[in-house]
Amino acid sequence: MAIKNSDVIENAGDYVLRGIILHNHEGEGVKPETRGVNIAPLVLELNIFESIYKNSVVGSVVVLDTQNIIGNLPIQGTERISFKLSTPGAHGSASIDCSTTTGHPMHVYALTDRTQQGDNAVSYVLHFASREFLRNVRTKVSKAFTGRLDEIVYAIFKDEEGLDSRKHLDFQKTRNQDKFVIPNLPPMSAIQMIANRSLGDNSKSAGFHFYETTKGYQFRSWESLCVDSNGEPRPPKQTFEYRPANVRPKFKKGPSDKDSILDSYEEVETYKFLNSSHDTAANQAVGTYAHRVISHNLYDKSYNVKDYNYHISFDDTKHTDKLAGPSVVNTPVDYDNRGLSDYSEALVSLMSTTRFAHNEDTGAFGVDVAQDGALEGKRHGKRNEILSGTTLELRVKGQSYLSAGDVIQFNLPNIDANNPTKKLDPQAAGRYIITNLRHRVTDEDYIQILECVKDATFKPYHTQNIKNYTNIAGRQQSHKRPRDIDKVKE
Protein backbone atom coordinates (compact mmCIF):
# COMPACT_ATOMS: atom_id res chain seq x y z
CA MET A 1 0.00 0.00 0.00
CA ALA A 2 1.40 3.38 -0.99
CA ILE A 3 2.23 5.92 1.71
CA LYS A 4 0.11 9.00 0.99
CA ASN A 5 0.98 12.42 2.36
CA SER A 6 -1.06 14.84 0.28
CA ASP A 7 -3.58 16.84 2.27
CA VAL A 8 -5.34 18.03 -0.89
CA ILE A 9 -8.26 16.13 -2.38
CA GLU A 10 -7.81 15.43 -6.05
CA ASN A 11 -10.47 12.73 -6.34
CA ALA A 12 -13.18 11.40 -4.05
CA GLY A 13 -11.73 8.38 -2.26
CA ASP A 14 -8.31 9.99 -1.65
CA TYR A 15 -6.84 9.50 1.79
CA VAL A 16 -3.88 10.41 3.97
CA LEU A 17 -1.96 7.47 5.45
CA ARG A 18 1.68 8.16 6.24
CA GLY A 19 2.48 4.66 7.41
CA ILE A 20 1.35 1.53 9.23
CA ILE A 21 3.85 0.81 12.00
CA LEU A 22 4.09 -2.63 13.55
CA HIS A 23 5.70 -2.74 17.01
CA ASN A 24 6.95 -6.02 18.41
CA HIS A 25 6.45 -7.35 21.96
CA GLU A 26 9.51 -5.43 23.25
CA GLY A 27 8.34 -2.12 21.79
CA GLU A 28 11.09 -2.19 19.22
CA GLY A 29 11.28 -2.87 15.52
CA VAL A 30 13.57 -2.92 12.57
CA LYS A 31 13.92 0.89 12.51
CA PRO A 32 14.87 2.42 15.90
CA GLU A 33 13.65 5.90 14.91
CA THR A 34 10.06 4.67 14.54
CA ARG A 35 10.32 2.05 17.30
CA GLY A 36 8.74 -0.32 14.82
CA VAL A 37 8.67 -1.30 11.19
CA ASN A 38 6.55 0.42 8.57
CA ILE A 39 4.64 -2.39 6.86
CA ALA A 40 2.50 -0.08 4.69
CA PRO A 41 4.38 -1.03 1.47
CA LEU A 42 3.53 -4.68 2.19
CA VAL A 43 -0.14 -4.13 3.07
CA LEU A 44 -2.70 -5.01 0.40
CA GLU A 45 -5.75 -3.97 2.38
CA LEU A 46 -6.59 -2.25 5.67
CA ASN A 47 -10.01 -2.78 7.26
CA ILE A 48 -11.50 -1.14 10.35
CA PHE A 49 -14.89 -2.14 11.76
CA GLU A 50 -17.10 -0.24 14.22
CA SER A 51 -20.67 -0.88 15.32
CA ILE A 52 -23.23 0.37 17.85
CA TYR A 53 -23.77 -3.32 18.70
CA LYS A 54 -20.10 -3.96 19.53
CA ASN A 55 -18.08 -2.84 22.54
CA SER A 56 -14.79 -2.51 20.64
CA VAL A 57 -13.33 -1.41 17.35
CA VAL A 58 -11.63 -4.26 15.47
CA GLY A 59 -9.80 -4.52 12.16
CA SER A 60 -7.37 -6.38 9.97
CA VAL A 61 -4.49 -5.87 7.57
CA VAL A 62 -3.79 -8.20 4.66
CA VAL A 63 0.00 -8.47 4.26
CA LEU A 64 2.11 -9.75 1.38
CA ASP A 65 5.41 -10.26 3.23
CA THR A 66 8.48 -10.25 1.00
CA GLN A 67 10.88 -9.20 3.80
CA ASN A 68 10.24 -12.01 6.31
CA ILE A 69 8.80 -9.55 8.83
CA ILE A 70 6.91 -12.47 10.33
CA GLY A 71 10.22 -14.05 11.35
CA ASN A 72 12.51 -11.07 11.87
CA LEU A 73 10.28 -8.97 14.11
CA PRO A 74 8.91 -11.62 15.02
CA ILE A 75 5.08 -11.66 14.91
CA GLN A 76 3.42 -13.78 17.58
CA GLY A 77 0.14 -12.03 18.48
CA THR A 78 1.29 -9.56 21.16
CA GLU A 79 2.26 -6.71 18.83
CA ARG A 80 0.82 -3.23 18.51
CA ILE A 81 -0.06 -1.52 15.26
CA SER A 82 -0.20 2.24 14.81
CA PHE A 83 -1.40 4.47 11.98
CA LYS A 84 -3.35 7.64 11.27
CA LEU A 85 -5.97 7.62 8.54
CA SER A 86 -7.92 10.63 7.32
CA THR A 87 -9.70 12.16 4.39
CA PRO A 88 -7.45 14.93 3.00
CA GLY A 89 -8.13 18.13 4.90
CA ALA A 90 -9.64 16.33 7.91
CA HIS A 91 -7.79 16.83 11.19
CA GLY A 92 -8.25 16.23 14.91
CA SER A 93 -11.37 14.28 15.79
CA ALA A 94 -12.30 14.02 12.09
CA SER A 95 -9.40 11.60 11.55
CA ILE A 96 -8.90 8.00 12.69
CA ASP A 97 -5.97 8.43 15.05
CA CYS A 98 -4.35 5.16 16.11
CA SER A 99 -0.87 6.65 16.42
CA THR A 100 1.43 6.28 19.43
CA THR A 101 1.82 10.04 19.98
CA THR A 102 -1.64 11.59 19.72
CA GLY A 103 -3.94 8.60 19.55
CA HIS A 104 -4.41 5.06 20.77
CA PRO A 105 -2.58 2.23 18.93
CA MET A 106 -4.37 -0.97 18.11
CA HIS A 107 -3.29 -4.33 19.50
CA VAL A 108 -2.65 -7.40 17.34
CA TYR A 109 -4.28 -10.53 18.73
CA ALA A 110 -4.24 -13.07 15.89
CA LEU A 111 -2.46 -14.06 12.70
CA THR A 112 -4.47 -16.14 10.23
CA ASP A 113 -4.55 -17.33 6.62
CA ARG A 114 -0.80 -17.73 6.26
CA THR A 115 -0.12 -18.85 2.67
CA GLN A 116 3.08 -19.26 0.69
CA GLN A 117 3.15 -16.99 -2.35
CA GLY A 118 5.98 -18.26 -4.49
CA ASP A 119 9.51 -18.86 -3.18
CA ASN A 120 10.14 -15.46 -1.56
CA ALA A 121 6.81 -14.23 -0.22
CA VAL A 122 4.11 -15.22 2.23
CA SER A 123 0.71 -13.68 2.74
CA TYR A 124 -1.22 -13.52 6.00
CA VAL A 125 -3.87 -11.50 7.82
CA LEU A 126 -3.13 -9.65 11.07
CA HIS A 127 -6.21 -9.10 13.21
CA PHE A 128 -6.18 -6.18 15.64
CA ALA A 129 -8.50 -4.52 18.13
CA SER A 130 -8.54 -1.66 20.58
CA ARG A 131 -6.73 -2.12 23.89
CA GLU A 132 -10.10 -2.34 25.69
CA PHE A 133 -11.03 -5.45 23.70
CA LEU A 134 -8.10 -7.37 25.16
CA ARG A 135 -8.39 -5.72 28.56
CA ASN A 136 -11.94 -7.04 28.73
CA VAL A 137 -10.87 -10.68 28.25
CA ARG A 138 -8.04 -10.36 30.77
CA THR A 139 -9.78 -8.76 33.75
CA LYS A 140 -12.92 -9.18 35.83
CA VAL A 141 -15.04 -6.80 37.91
CA SER A 142 -16.11 -8.01 41.35
CA LYS A 143 -17.31 -4.96 43.21
CA ALA A 144 -20.43 -3.13 44.43
CA PHE A 145 -21.44 0.21 42.93
CA THR A 146 -24.12 2.67 44.00
CA GLY A 147 -25.38 5.78 42.27
CA ARG A 148 -26.70 7.07 38.98
CA LEU A 149 -26.25 4.42 36.30
CA ASP A 150 -24.14 6.52 33.92
CA GLU A 151 -21.78 7.32 36.82
CA ILE A 152 -21.44 3.61 37.64
CA VAL A 153 -20.57 2.89 34.01
CA TYR A 154 -17.90 5.59 34.06
CA ALA A 155 -16.44 4.15 37.27
CA ILE A 156 -16.07 0.70 35.67
CA PHE A 157 -14.80 2.28 32.44
CA LYS A 158 -11.96 4.07 34.28
CA ASP A 159 -11.26 1.53 37.04
CA GLU A 160 -7.56 0.64 36.96
CA GLU A 161 -8.46 -2.91 37.97
CA GLY A 162 -11.28 -3.07 35.41
CA LEU A 163 -11.40 -1.73 31.87
CA ASP A 164 -8.87 1.02 32.67
CA SER A 165 -9.68 2.91 29.46
CA ARG A 166 -7.74 6.07 28.60
CA LYS A 167 -10.27 7.19 25.99
CA HIS A 168 -13.16 9.63 25.93
CA LEU A 169 -16.56 8.39 27.07
CA ASP A 170 -19.48 10.42 25.74
CA PHE A 171 -22.57 9.62 27.76
CA GLN A 172 -26.24 10.43 28.15
CA LYS A 173 -27.34 11.12 31.69
CA THR A 174 -29.68 8.51 33.18
CA ARG A 175 -32.73 9.34 35.27
CA ASN A 176 -32.46 6.24 37.43
CA GLN A 177 -29.97 5.19 40.09
CA ASP A 178 -29.46 1.88 41.83
CA LYS A 179 -26.97 -0.41 43.52
CA PHE A 180 -25.23 -3.12 41.49
CA VAL A 181 -23.14 -5.96 42.87
CA ILE A 182 -21.03 -7.13 39.93
CA PRO A 183 -20.40 -10.89 40.31
CA ASN A 184 -16.93 -11.38 38.80
CA LEU A 185 -17.87 -10.34 35.25
CA PRO A 186 -15.74 -8.99 32.41
CA PRO A 187 -15.95 -5.17 32.50
CA MET A 188 -17.92 -4.86 29.28
CA SER A 189 -20.40 -7.52 30.38
CA ALA A 190 -20.93 -5.56 33.59
CA ILE A 191 -21.46 -2.34 31.65
CA GLN A 192 -23.87 -4.05 29.24
CA MET A 193 -25.88 -5.37 32.18
CA ILE A 194 -26.22 -1.80 33.45
CA ALA A 195 -26.98 -0.50 29.94
CA ASN A 196 -29.98 -2.85 29.75
CA ARG A 197 -31.39 -1.22 32.90
CA SER A 198 -30.63 2.40 31.98
CA LEU A 199 -33.43 4.94 31.51
CA GLY A 200 -32.69 8.11 29.56
CA ASP A 201 -32.91 11.45 31.32
CA ASN A 202 -35.92 13.54 30.20
CA SER A 203 -37.03 10.62 28.07
CA LYS A 204 -39.34 7.63 28.16
CA SER A 205 -36.70 5.42 26.51
CA ALA A 206 -35.46 2.23 28.15
CA GLY A 207 -32.15 0.54 27.42
CA PHE A 208 -28.80 2.04 26.32
CA HIS A 209 -26.07 1.18 23.84
CA PHE A 210 -22.44 0.95 24.94
CA TYR A 211 -20.07 0.92 21.98
CA GLU A 212 -16.75 2.12 20.63
CA THR A 213 -16.12 4.13 17.48
CA THR A 214 -12.85 5.33 16.00
CA LYS A 215 -13.48 8.58 17.92
CA GLY A 216 -14.01 7.07 21.38
CA TYR A 217 -16.69 5.38 23.49
CA GLN A 218 -20.43 6.09 23.67
CA PHE A 219 -23.02 5.26 26.35
CA ARG A 220 -26.45 6.43 25.24
CA SER A 221 -29.96 5.51 24.12
CA TRP A 222 -31.15 5.10 20.54
CA GLU A 223 -33.35 8.16 21.02
CA SER A 224 -30.32 10.33 21.85
CA LEU A 225 -28.78 9.30 18.52
CA CYS A 226 -31.87 10.62 16.73
CA VAL A 227 -32.43 13.88 18.62
CA ASP A 228 -30.57 16.28 20.91
CA SER A 229 -31.40 17.04 24.55
CA ASN A 230 -34.11 19.48 23.41
CA GLY A 231 -35.82 16.82 21.32
CA GLU A 232 -34.77 18.38 18.02
CA PRO A 233 -33.48 16.12 15.21
CA ARG A 234 -29.70 15.93 15.07
CA PRO A 235 -28.33 17.38 11.82
CA PRO A 236 -27.08 14.67 9.44
CA LYS A 237 -23.31 14.28 9.18
CA GLN A 238 -23.63 13.69 5.44
CA THR A 239 -26.30 13.55 2.76
CA PHE A 240 -26.11 10.69 0.27
CA GLU A 241 -28.00 10.36 -2.97
CA TYR A 242 -28.68 7.52 -5.33
CA ARG A 243 -28.57 8.95 -8.84
CA PRO A 244 -30.16 6.97 -11.64
CA ALA A 245 -28.13 6.86 -14.86
CA ASN A 246 -30.44 9.30 -16.62
CA VAL A 247 -29.79 12.06 -14.06
CA ARG A 248 -26.08 11.64 -13.41
CA PRO A 249 -23.78 13.26 -12.48
CA LYS A 250 -26.40 15.00 -10.35
CA PHE A 251 -29.73 16.78 -10.27
CA LYS A 252 -27.72 20.02 -10.32
CA LYS A 253 -24.27 20.51 -11.80
CA GLY A 254 -21.48 21.95 -9.66
CA PRO A 255 -19.79 25.05 -11.15
CA SER A 256 -16.24 24.05 -10.17
CA ASP A 257 -13.95 21.07 -9.71
CA LYS A 258 -14.20 21.50 -5.95
CA ASP A 259 -17.96 21.25 -6.11
CA SER A 260 -17.60 18.22 -8.38
CA ILE A 261 -15.41 16.44 -5.80
CA LEU A 262 -17.76 17.26 -2.93
CA ASP A 263 -20.59 16.13 -5.15
CA SER A 264 -18.86 12.76 -5.64
CA TYR A 265 -18.69 12.23 -1.87
CA GLU A 266 -22.48 12.45 -1.74
CA GLU A 267 -23.05 9.97 -4.54
CA VAL A 268 -23.81 6.38 -3.56
CA GLU A 269 -21.81 3.84 -5.57
CA THR A 270 -24.21 1.00 -4.77
CA TYR A 271 -27.02 0.43 -2.31
CA LYS A 272 -29.28 -2.41 -1.25
CA PHE A 273 -31.90 -2.96 1.40
CA LEU A 274 -31.04 -5.90 3.62
CA ASN A 275 -34.59 -6.35 4.93
CA SER A 276 -36.80 -3.93 3.03
CA SER A 277 -39.79 -6.28 3.34
CA HIS A 278 -40.42 -6.57 7.05
CA ASP A 279 -40.97 -10.09 8.34
CA THR A 280 -44.14 -9.50 10.32
CA ALA A 281 -44.41 -13.18 11.28
CA ALA A 282 -40.96 -13.22 12.88
CA ASN A 283 -41.52 -9.82 14.50
CA GLN A 284 -44.82 -11.02 15.92
CA ALA A 285 -43.12 -14.08 17.40
CA VAL A 286 -40.24 -12.19 19.08
CA GLY A 287 -42.44 -9.47 20.58
CA THR A 288 -41.64 -6.49 18.36
CA TYR A 289 -45.27 -5.46 18.09
CA ALA A 290 -46.80 -6.93 21.25
CA HIS A 291 -45.34 -8.53 24.34
CA ARG A 292 -46.82 -9.58 27.66
CA VAL A 293 -44.39 -9.33 30.57
CA ILE A 294 -45.33 -11.02 33.83
CA SER A 295 -43.14 -9.68 36.63
CA HIS A 296 -42.93 -11.83 39.76
CA ASN A 297 -42.08 -9.90 42.92
CA LEU A 298 -39.99 -12.22 45.09
CA TYR A 299 -40.32 -9.91 48.09
CA ASP A 300 -44.08 -10.04 48.59
CA LYS A 301 -44.86 -13.04 46.32
CA SER A 302 -47.09 -10.94 44.06
CA TYR A 303 -47.12 -10.70 40.29
CA ASN A 304 -47.96 -7.99 37.80
CA VAL A 305 -48.98 -8.30 34.14
CA LYS A 306 -48.04 -5.56 31.68
CA ASP A 307 -48.70 -5.57 27.93
CA TYR A 308 -46.42 -3.74 25.52
CA ASN A 309 -48.14 -2.31 22.44
CA TYR A 310 -45.91 -1.02 19.65
CA HIS A 311 -48.44 1.39 18.17
CA ILE A 312 -49.55 2.86 21.50
CA SER A 313 -45.92 3.31 22.59
CA PHE A 314 -44.66 4.66 19.24
CA ASP A 315 -45.06 8.36 20.10
CA ASP A 316 -43.48 7.98 23.56
CA THR A 317 -40.00 8.36 22.05
CA LYS A 318 -38.39 10.20 19.14
CA HIS A 319 -37.45 8.41 15.94
CA THR A 320 -35.06 8.84 13.03
CA ASP A 321 -37.46 11.02 11.02
CA LYS A 322 -39.29 13.92 12.63
CA LEU A 323 -42.63 13.19 10.94
CA ALA A 324 -42.09 9.45 11.04
CA GLY A 325 -44.79 6.84 11.06
CA PRO A 326 -44.80 3.25 12.36
CA SER A 327 -43.12 0.67 10.14
CA VAL A 328 -46.42 -1.22 9.86
CA VAL A 329 -50.01 -0.06 10.27
CA ASN A 330 -52.33 -1.42 12.93
CA THR A 331 -55.42 -2.13 10.86
CA PRO A 332 -57.17 -5.47 11.56
CA VAL A 333 -55.28 -8.51 10.27
CA ASP A 334 -57.81 -11.25 11.07
CA TYR A 335 -61.49 -11.87 11.67
CA ASP A 336 -61.11 -11.14 15.37
CA ASN A 337 -60.56 -7.51 14.26
CA ARG A 338 -57.27 -7.13 16.07
CA GLY A 339 -54.16 -5.44 14.69
CA LEU A 340 -50.55 -6.65 14.98
CA SER A 341 -50.02 -4.84 18.29
CA ASP A 342 -53.14 -6.29 19.88
CA TYR A 343 -51.87 -9.88 20.19
CA SER A 344 -50.09 -9.46 23.51
CA GLU A 345 -49.84 -13.21 24.02
CA ALA A 346 -47.74 -13.65 20.88
CA LEU A 347 -44.79 -13.46 23.27
CA VAL A 348 -45.16 -13.99 27.00
CA SER A 349 -42.12 -13.70 29.25
CA LEU A 350 -41.60 -14.01 32.98
CA MET A 351 -39.41 -11.50 34.79
CA SER A 352 -38.24 -12.02 38.36
CA THR A 353 -37.95 -8.83 40.37
CA THR A 354 -37.91 -7.77 44.00
CA ARG A 355 -37.96 -4.82 46.35
CA PHE A 356 -35.40 -4.07 49.04
CA ALA A 357 -32.67 -6.17 47.41
CA HIS A 358 -30.23 -3.50 48.60
CA ASN A 359 -32.47 -1.91 51.25
CA GLU A 360 -34.08 0.26 48.57
CA ASP A 361 -37.81 0.17 47.80
CA THR A 362 -37.14 -0.17 44.06
CA GLY A 363 -37.19 -2.84 41.39
CA ALA A 364 -34.89 -4.02 38.61
CA PHE A 365 -34.64 -0.58 36.97
CA GLY A 366 -34.02 1.35 40.18
CA VAL A 367 -37.54 2.81 40.13
CA ASP A 368 -40.93 1.66 41.44
CA VAL A 369 -41.07 -2.14 41.14
CA ALA A 370 -44.55 -1.89 39.62
CA GLN A 371 -42.97 -0.35 36.49
CA ASP A 372 -40.60 -3.25 35.85
CA GLY A 373 -42.86 -5.16 33.47
CA ALA A 374 -43.77 -2.10 31.40
CA LEU A 375 -40.13 -0.95 31.17
CA GLU A 376 -38.88 -4.41 30.20
CA GLY A 377 -41.53 -4.65 27.49
CA LYS A 378 -40.54 -1.23 26.17
CA ARG A 379 -36.80 -2.06 26.25
CA HIS A 380 -37.31 -5.39 24.50
CA GLY A 381 -39.65 -3.86 21.92
CA LYS A 382 -37.30 -0.99 21.10
CA ARG A 383 -34.35 -3.33 20.60
CA ASN A 384 -36.36 -5.46 18.17
CA GLU A 385 -37.76 -2.35 16.49
CA ILE A 386 -34.20 -1.30 15.65
CA LEU A 387 -32.98 -4.76 14.62
CA SER A 388 -36.00 -5.26 12.36
CA GLY A 389 -36.12 -1.69 11.07
CA THR A 390 -35.44 -0.76 7.46
CA THR A 391 -31.77 -1.73 7.06
CA LEU A 392 -29.83 -0.11 4.24
CA GLU A 393 -26.32 -0.90 3.01
CA LEU A 394 -24.44 1.87 1.20
CA ARG A 395 -21.07 1.80 -0.52
CA VAL A 396 -19.60 5.33 -0.59
CA LYS A 397 -16.26 7.12 -0.87
CA GLY A 398 -14.34 7.12 2.42
CA GLN A 399 -14.99 10.02 4.80
CA SER A 400 -12.99 9.61 8.00
CA TYR A 401 -15.24 11.88 10.07
CA LEU A 402 -18.16 9.42 9.82
CA SER A 403 -18.67 7.03 12.74
CA ALA A 404 -21.13 4.42 13.91
CA GLY A 405 -24.06 6.19 15.56
CA ASP A 406 -24.01 9.19 13.19
CA VAL A 407 -27.13 10.42 11.42
CA ILE A 408 -27.13 10.50 7.62
CA GLN A 409 -29.70 11.61 5.07
CA PHE A 410 -30.43 9.25 2.17
CA ASN A 411 -32.20 10.76 -0.81
CA LEU A 412 -33.70 7.90 -2.80
CA PRO A 413 -35.84 9.01 -5.75
CA ASN A 414 -39.18 7.33 -6.20
CA ILE A 415 -38.84 4.65 -8.88
CA ASP A 416 -41.96 5.90 -10.65
CA ALA A 417 -40.97 6.48 -14.27
CA ASN A 418 -43.21 9.54 -14.37
CA ASN A 419 -41.30 11.34 -11.64
CA PRO A 420 -40.10 14.58 -13.22
CA THR A 421 -39.91 16.40 -9.87
CA LYS A 422 -37.69 13.67 -8.43
CA LYS A 423 -39.91 13.04 -5.43
CA LEU A 424 -38.31 10.86 -2.78
CA ASP A 425 -39.41 7.37 -1.86
CA PRO A 426 -42.01 7.96 0.88
CA GLN A 427 -40.95 4.99 3.00
CA ALA A 428 -37.26 4.27 2.32
CA ALA A 429 -35.81 7.78 1.93
CA GLY A 430 -35.01 10.05 4.86
CA ARG A 431 -32.77 9.91 7.90
CA TYR A 432 -30.83 6.83 9.00
CA ILE A 433 -28.50 5.94 11.85
CA ILE A 434 -25.20 4.28 10.92
CA THR A 435 -25.20 1.05 12.92
CA ASN A 436 -22.24 -0.75 11.32
CA LEU A 437 -19.33 0.85 9.48
CA ARG A 438 -16.42 -0.70 7.60
CA HIS A 439 -13.46 1.43 6.51
CA ARG A 440 -11.63 -0.27 3.63
CA VAL A 441 -8.34 1.15 2.34
CA THR A 442 -6.38 -0.18 -0.62
CA ASP A 443 -3.78 1.30 -2.96
CA GLU A 444 -6.55 2.54 -5.21
CA ASP A 445 -8.85 4.33 -2.79
CA TYR A 446 -10.63 4.58 0.54
CA ILE A 447 -14.23 3.42 0.64
CA GLN A 448 -16.80 2.82 3.35
CA ILE A 449 -19.56 0.27 3.58
CA LEU A 450 -22.30 1.70 5.78
CA GLU A 451 -25.08 -0.36 7.31
CA CYS A 452 -27.81 2.04 8.36
CA VAL A 453 -31.17 1.66 10.09
CA LYS A 454 -34.33 3.70 10.36
CA ASP A 455 -36.91 2.71 12.95
CA ALA A 456 -39.87 4.24 11.12
CA THR A 457 -41.03 5.33 7.69
CA PHE A 458 -39.98 8.62 6.06
CA LYS A 459 -43.65 9.55 5.73
CA PRO A 460 -46.50 7.85 7.62
CA TYR A 461 -48.58 5.30 5.77
CA HIS A 462 -51.99 6.53 4.71
CA THR A 463 -54.64 4.54 6.58
CA GLN A 464 -58.37 4.72 6.95
CA ASN A 465 -60.01 4.13 10.30
CA ILE A 466 -60.99 0.57 9.46
CA LYS A 467 -61.89 -1.56 12.49
CA ASN A 468 -63.61 -4.47 10.82
CA TYR A 469 -61.51 -7.08 8.99
CA THR A 470 -64.48 -8.10 6.87
CA ASN A 471 -64.38 -4.66 5.24
CA ILE A 472 -60.82 -5.46 4.12
CA ALA A 473 -60.95 -9.16 3.24
CA GLY A 474 -64.64 -9.66 2.53
CA ARG A 475 -66.83 -12.38 3.96
CA GLN A 476 -65.59 -15.94 3.85
CA GLN A 477 -67.72 -19.04 4.28
CA SER A 478 -67.19 -20.68 7.67
CA HIS A 479 -67.39 -24.46 8.06
CA LYS A 480 -68.37 -25.20 11.64
CA ARG A 481 -68.69 -28.99 11.49
CA PRO A 482 -65.84 -31.46 10.93
CA ARG A 483 -66.08 -33.92 8.06
CA ASP A 484 -65.72 -37.66 8.40
CA ILE A 485 -63.23 -38.71 5.73
CA ASP A 486 -65.19 -41.91 5.07
CA LYS A 487 -68.16 -39.81 4.03
CA VAL A 488 -66.29 -37.32 1.90
CA LYS A 489 -66.85 -37.87 -1.79
CA GLU A 490 -63.74 -37.92 -3.93
Image (cartoon, rainbow, N blue to C red):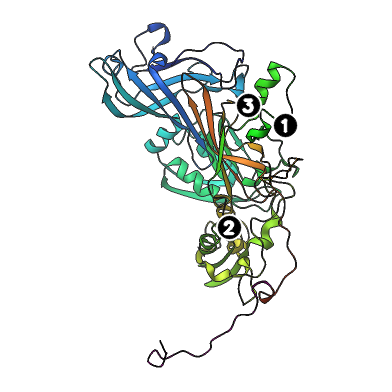
- Name the one closer to the observer, 250 or 327: 250
Decide: marks 3, 2 in contact (CB < 8 A)? no
Q: Which residue is mark 3?
A: 265
- Secondary structure mostly seen in magenta is loop
- What span is colored magenta in the figure? 472-489
- Between disc 1 and disc 3, the foreground one is 1
In the rendered structure, the answer to whether residue 401 lies left or right of residue 61 reads right
Residue 487 on the magenta segment: yes
Which of pointers 3 and 2 lies earlier in the amino acid sequence?
3
Pinpoint residue 487: horizontal percent, then vertical percent.
41, 93
- SS type, badge 2: helix
Between 371 and 182, the residue placed more toward the observer is: 371
Rendered position, 443 above or below 171: above
Q: Tell me residue 1's x, y (percent).
A: 43, 16
Q: Which residue is mark 1?
A: 251
Q: Is residue 485 left or right of residue 391?
A: left
